[in-house]
């Protein structure tokens, strides 16, 4: 998998498949929206969706009145699709076409959301690099929401291997810099009438110290 071309893989997916032909499609990203609503302190919080693709999360966040939304994705085609769908409203969103590993944040975020992008990192050094990037990119006390396949979920997504997570290995990954606030297990119904087990983890930057 060492010479795997991540960017080419995702451009091919978004160029050749319609929205409902990919397993991760959601008409409405209910869990993500509920968690953002629960943890955002106000509608002007600075938020970023990592590997947002052409998901409807940004559409719903705009509709709910959030004013500072960024969507980052490795696939230019995915972002183009989302922008086309949003029309005029697309101008109110910041779009970043980048591999997460090349992302040099110019601001610090209040909320970092990632559904089904982090779990594609299967090598230890990649996972550590992601954690370094999110730790730098998030404000003190900022909120990170990560959704991945759980230990009872699929082992692959879009034909490539993923890493499954449990509460314990999320704690091992993020526990040095973040306090876990909430873990929830959800099931995603794919457009192909199959069910995928997800785990969502909500964390706050900083470690709670016992006085
Ligand atoms: C399974 S899809 C999930 C899309 C969206 N988050 C959702 O929930 O519908 C994974 C997304 O992550 C993006 N992605 C994968 N690896 C990435 C990377 N290294 N940097 C940025 N985006 C990446 C893909 O292009 C794709 O849009």
Image (cartoon, rainbow, N blue to C red):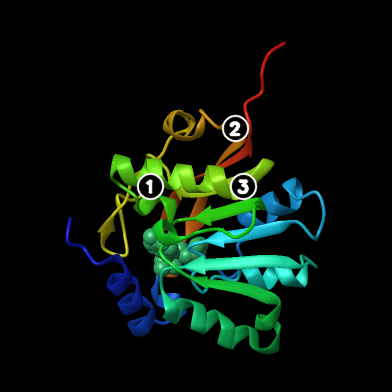
Dividing the picture into quadrants, the one containing residue 58 is bottom right
Quick check: can you spot residue 132?
yes
Marks 1 and 2, Cα distance to the nearest angstrom?
A: 21 Å
Q: Quadrant of the N terminus?
A: bottom left
Tell me what residue is drawn at x 57 percent, y 61 percent.
Answer: 49
Upstream in the sequence, badge 2 or badge 3? 3
Q: Is mark 2 within 8 Å of ligand 1?
A: no
- Indicate whether 182 appears above or below 3: above
| Residue marked by disc 2 | 180
Q: Quadrant of the C terminus?
A: top right
Depth-wise, is mark 1 or mark 3 nearer the camera?
Answer: 3
Name the residue at 62% across, 72% down.
Answer: 94
Q: Which residue is mark 3?
A: 138
Q: Nearer the viewer, residue 106 or 204?
A: 106
Residue lying farthest top? 211
Q: Secondary structure at mark 1?
A: loop
Q: Mark 1 to mark 3: distance in Å? A: 28 Å
Element marked by disc 3:
strand
- What's the residue at 73%, 46% (across, down)? 39
Residue under pointer 1: 153
Q: Residue 84's spot in the image, x, y percent?
A: 57, 88
């Amino acid at each position: 998998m060492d010479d795997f071309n991540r960017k080419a893989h995702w451009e091919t997916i978004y160029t050749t498949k319609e929205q409902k032909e990919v397993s991760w499609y959601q008409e409405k990203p209910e869990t993500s929206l509920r968690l953002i609503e629960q943890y955002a302190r106000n509608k002007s919080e600075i938020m970023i969706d990592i590997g947002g693709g052409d998901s409807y999360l940004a559409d719903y966040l705009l509709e709910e009145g959030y004013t500072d939304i960024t969507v980052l994705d490795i696939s230019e085609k995915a972002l183009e699709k989302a922008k086309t769908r949003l029309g005029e409203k697309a101008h109110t969103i910041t779009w970043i076409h980048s591999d997460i590993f090349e992302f040099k944040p110019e601001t610090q975020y209040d909320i970092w959301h990632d559904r089904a992008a982090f779990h594609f990192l299967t090598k230890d050094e990649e996972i550590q690099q992601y954690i370094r990037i999110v730790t730098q990119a998030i404000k003190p006390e900022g909120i990170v929401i990560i959704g991945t396949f759980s230990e009872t979920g699929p082992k692959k997504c879009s034909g490539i291997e993923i890493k499954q997570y449990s509460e314990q290995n999320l704690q091992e990954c993020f526990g040095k810099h973040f306090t876990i606030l909430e873990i929830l297990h959800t099931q995603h119904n794919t457009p192909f009438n199959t069910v995928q087990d997800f785990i969502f983890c909500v964390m706050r930057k900083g470690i709670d110290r016992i006085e």
